[in-house]
Amino acid sequence: MRMRLAVAGTLMAWLGACGGDAASDLPIAAAPTTPLPTLPMANDLSPVGPTTFVGAPGDTAILRVRATRTGGIPVIGVVVVFQVQAGGGAVKPFTTTTDYDGLASAQWTLGPAPAVNLATAAGGVATSPVSFSVSTFPDSTAAP
């Protein structure tokens, strides 16, 4: 304990000899000048292929979208989020990025019961998400 007090006292005496307020004598560090990374942005997110399907509970469907800039130029690296909106089930991957052709896709496993299943894909700065729907009906080949 005495050693700590002696060191603290010596430090305070040294700081006082350096001109008083030690905090004002310290150099100010400059903020980093590296720009923050920017996310690729798309003006439009459009479906590739059908957006309405018919199936059985538990079936799978592939959801595909394309991210483009004005003029239809594909955008690489746009983050696309796929979400199930109704009917249950799951989408994998939930989040992905567009490839060289501006394409992103996910596999949608439909809910377990007959229903209208809804999913969306959203990304970039597209004004509205792409909607997908699947009406599922009981398997007609199942034994009663």
Image (tube, rainbow, N blue to C red):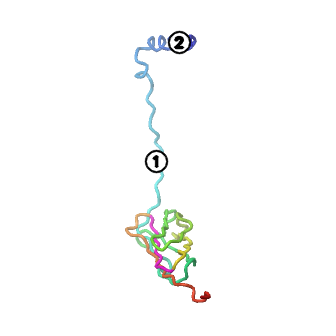
Front one among 29 and 79: 79
Q: Which range of residues does the magenta coloring cover?
A: 114-123
Q: Is 66 within the magenta?
A: no
Tell me the SS state at disc 2: helix
Residue at point 45%, 72% (across, down):
86
Around disc 1, counting alpha carbons within 10 Å, would you say few (fewer than 14), some (14 to 19), or many (20 or more)? few
Left or right, 20 with respect to 94, comes to left
Disc 1 marks a residue whose amino acid type is: Pro
How far apart are the two marked residues, 1 and 2, measured between alpha carbons?
45 Å
Tell me the SS state at disc 1: loop
Q: Is residue 19 above or below residue 134?
A: above
Residue found farthest to the front: 144
What mark, if any, has residue 59 been given in the picture?
Answer: none
Front one among 116 and 68: 116
Around disc 2, counting alpha carbons within 10 Å, would you say few (fewer than 14), some (14 to 19), or many (20 or more)? few
Disc 2 marks a residue whose amino acid type is: Leu
